[in-house]
Image (cartoon, rainbow, N blue to C red):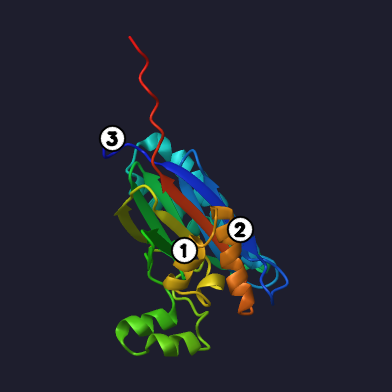
């Protein structure tokens, strides 16, 4: 089969309010036709967090679809769509006193034949699972993550820090934003996880891999991941979106 032949995608997503919160500020969305996927974790008083995350998801998906007519590389389309989501959330926050100060994290991915493109702002993460090994793709835009990367704090100290929720980059926090973009090649059997920090404060890459591999389907895996967070108390909302890449079926050629 040609190396660039597109893979078949399977997707499952689930969000949960968790054990402590009274509302769910996480949002997710996807467009299978555009092969675009996104998870957002909102922040702000009253309903502002859920408003921010829902608006970011909606604008990202709609802008990505609109940009298709420009025939841009998909990396650029994803970048532009994240920037557009930031402008939309920022504009809404400036126009309403009730929404002032709202924002959201964002982690998103799109597919280009046998390549994936991942973009993120904030501390919602993307993980990649291949042949039983799971790795974190994205870098958290958070105070403790930056302290770990600089060597000022070790991972154990970061995990115990009361500043875990302090993010340094967010959608809607300023008029402009700079998302990180990552790319990688895909093989049949690969699995991509987009998730909010409601999961990742309780499960590392090894635990995530074990839970996914022990599940009989992507739907079961989403439930198992959320149950793991809730087993540890789930002080935040928890959202998981899984995409599995499979070899596309090839139709037999018709006889002459």
Q: Mark 2 points at which residue?
A: 14
How many numbered discs, if any? 3
Q: For the residues labelled 3 and 2, say whether their Cβ atoms are less than 8 Å apart.
A: no
Disc 1 crowd rating (10 Å Cα; few below 14, some 14-19, many 20+) is some
Question: Helix or strand or loop: what does disc 3 sit on?
Answer: loop
Query: Residue at the spot x=53%, y=77% of the render?
Result: 202
Question: Which numbered disc flags the more N-terminal residue, 2 or 1?
Answer: 2
In the depicted structure, whether residue 45 falls above or below residue 194:
below
Along the horizontal axis of the image, is 159 left or right of 256? right
Work out whether residue 14 can be spotted: yes
Q: Name the residue under label 3.
A: 1
Q: Mark 1 points at which residue?
A: 175
Query: Residue at the spot x=66%, y=71% of the render?
Result: 18
Q: Which is more foreground, mark 2 or mark 1?
A: 2
In the depicted structure, whether residue 226 falls above or below residue 63:
below
Query: Residue at the spot x=52%, y=49% of the render?
Result: 11
Expressed as whole percent of the image width and height from the top left, the position of residue 113 reads 34, 41
Displayed quadrant of residue 221: bottom right
Along the horizontal axis of the image, is 217 left or right of 135? right
Question: Which numbered disc flags the more N-terminal residue, 3 or 2?
Answer: 3
Work out whether residue 234 can be spotted: no
Disc 2 crowd rating (10 Å Cα; few below 14, some 14-19, many 20+) is some
Q: Which is more foreground, mark 3 or mark 1?
A: 3
Q: In which quarter of the image is the N terminus?
A: top left
Furthest toward the top, the residue is 256
Q: For the residues labelled 2 and 1, say whether their Cβ atoms are less than 8 Å apart.
A: no
Query: Residue at the spot x=43%, y=81% of the render?
Result: 143
For the residues labelled 3 and 1, the Cα–Cα distance comes to 46 Å
Q: 233 and 63: which one is in front?
A: 233
Expressed as whole percent of the image width and height from the top left, the position of residue 23 reads 71, 68
For the residues labelled 3 and 2, the Cα–Cα distance comes to 34 Å
């Amino acid at each position: 089969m040609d190396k660039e032949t597109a893979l078949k995608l399977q997707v499952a997503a689930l969000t949960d309010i968790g054990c402590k919160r009274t509302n769910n500020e996480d949002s997710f969305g996807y467009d299978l036709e555009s092969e675009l996927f996104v998870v957002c974790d909102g922040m702000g008083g009253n309903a502002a967090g859920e408003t921010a995350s829902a608006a970011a998801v909606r604008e990202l998906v709609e802008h990505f679809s609109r940009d298709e007519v420009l025939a841009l590389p998909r990396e650029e389309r994803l970048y532009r769509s994240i920037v557009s989501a930031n402008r939309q959330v920022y504009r809404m926050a400036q126009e309403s006193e009730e929404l002032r100060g709202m924002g959201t994290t964002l982690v998103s991915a799109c597919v280009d034949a046998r390549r994936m493109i991942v973009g993120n702002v904030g501390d919602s993460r993307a993980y990649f699972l291949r042949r039983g090994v799971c790795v974190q793709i994205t870098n958290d835009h958070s105070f403790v993550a930056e302290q770990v990367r600089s060597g000022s704090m070790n991972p154990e100290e970061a995990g115990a820090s009361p500043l875990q929720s302090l993010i340094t980059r967010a959608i809607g926090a300023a008029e402009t934003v700079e998302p990180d973009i990552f790319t990688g090649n895909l093989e049949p059997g690969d699995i991509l996880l987009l998730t909010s920090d409601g999961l990742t404060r309780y499960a590392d890459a090894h635990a995530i891999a074990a839970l996914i591999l022990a599940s009989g389907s992507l739907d079961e895996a989403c439930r198992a991941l959320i149950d793991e967070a809730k087993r540890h108390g789930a002080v935040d909302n928890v959202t998981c979106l899984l995409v599995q890449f499979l070899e596309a079926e090839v139709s037999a050629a018709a006889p002459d």
